[in-house]
Every structure is written in structure tokens, then in C-alpha cells.
Amino acid sequence: MVRLDTLLGVGLLFRIGDKIVYPMHGAGIIEAIEEKEILGEKQQYYIMKMPVGNMQVMIPMEKVSNLGIRQVVDMHALERVMEILRREEDDLGISWNRRYRRNMEKMRTGDIYQVAAVVRELMHREKEKGLSTGERKMLDNARQILLSELVLVKDIDEEQATHLLEQVVNS
């Protein structure tokens, strides 16, 4: 029997059915591994279906480690996320562009704890002072990323995940 990774000629980090997170995009489930020709070059791709937004994303297998793709967190890590969401805002007195740059750096890490901190800070700021257009877009993106992972870890739908997020941040 030939192993799939040998057949494809690349190391196989993830398998069909794995739940993964693509930083700056969100969480999804690998539905297939396919060879595609794009701009005359054949490559192997993970085909990931994202439950939030109902999108499909093609991820080049040879670039997976450089993209920061990881498995979704477990329930223990999710509890820590909830603790982060319950904390008070900690960016008081920071200028808009410093706060924006700092939050963007957190988002790029793909670390769920960093994304949760961005969601918490921007949701609190939105309630207290409102958000600029750029921060509003960042909050929407961070929420989508966090919600997509909540959906997969807790096996709930997007509406339930949204309700849970609102409840935890406002507690």
C-alpha cells in the first residue's frame, strides 16, 4: 500500500477531516487534497471548507508551515480563551494607530489567545467610544476568526457561537 504523502510527493501535515486554522482567515475542515494547475504550475492543495461564511479555501501544501496553519485548539485552551474575553480592556491611553498596528500584529500570529484579546479590546472600545472604520473592519475579521474556531471546537452553529461570544465578553 502506498502512503498518500508518498504518492503526492510532499510531507503530509494534515489529513482529510482535520480541523485547522488559517491565520487571518479562520478555522475550517480539510475536505480534500487535490492537485491543481495554476499559472502553468501544478501544486498540491488542501481544500478547506470554512463553516462561518460558508467559504472554501485552497491552501498550497508546500507553504503550510510558512503560513502558520495549525490545528484548532482543544476545550482546555478554549476555556483560557473565555478567561481572556472576560478580562477588562487593557489598551487605555494608546493612540489609534499604535493600537491598530499592535492589534494587526496580534491577528497575524494566528494565536487564538491574541485574536481573543483583539476581540475583547475592540468590543469594549466599541461600546465605550465607538470604532473607526479600520478598527470596525478589524473587529469583524477577528470575530469571524474566533467564531469559526468556536464553531468547530464546541460543535455548535454560528448563531450559537455568536451568542456565546457576546455573553462572555459582556459578563
Image (cartoon, rainbow, N blue to C red):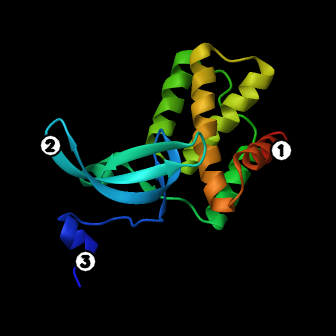
Is residue 28 left or right of 169 when viewed as pictured? left
| Among numbered discs 2 and 3, the one appearing first in the sequence | 3
Q: Nearer the viewer, residue 165 or 31?
A: 31
Q: Is residue 151 above or below residue 127?
A: below
Q: Which residue is mark 2?
A: 41
Q: Position of residue 152 (x, y in %)?
A: 61, 57
Rounded to the nearest angstrom, the CA distance separating label 1 from label 3 is: 46 Å
Is residue 33 left or right of 131 when viewed as pictured? left
Are discs 1 and 3 less than 8 Å apart at CB? no
Q: Is residue 167 above or below residue 90?
A: below
Q: Position of residue 1 (x, y in %)?
A: 23, 85
Instruction: Please tell me whether mark 1 or mark 2 is closer to you in this view.
Output: 2
Rounded to the nearest angstrom, the CA distance separating label 2 from label 3 is: 24 Å
Query: Mark 1 is on which residue type?
Result: Gln
Whether residue 90 is visible, yes or no, is no
Q: Residue at x 24, y 66 (%)?
A: 11
Q: Helix, strand, or loop for circle 2?
A: strand
Q: Residue at x 35, y 48 (%)?
A: 59
Q: Position of residue 80 (x, y in %)?
A: 67, 57
Whether residue 22 is visible, yes or no, is yes
**Callout 2 environment at 10 Å: few (<14), some (14 to 19), or many (20+)?**
few
Query: Mark 3 is on which residue type?
Result: Arg
**Callout 3 environment at 10 Å: few (<14), some (14 to 19), or many (20+)?**
few
Is residue 15 left or right of 147 when viewed as pictured? left
| Among numbered discs 1 and 3, the one appearing first in the sequence | 3
Task: Please state, as top left, top right, bottom left or bottom right, where the C terminus lies in the image.
Answer: top right
Q: Residue furthest bottom?
A: 1
Are discs 2 and 3 less than 8 Å apart at CB? no
Q: Residue at x 61, y 45 (%)?
A: 146
Q: Which residue is mark 3?
A: 3
Q: Which residue is mark 1?
A: 167
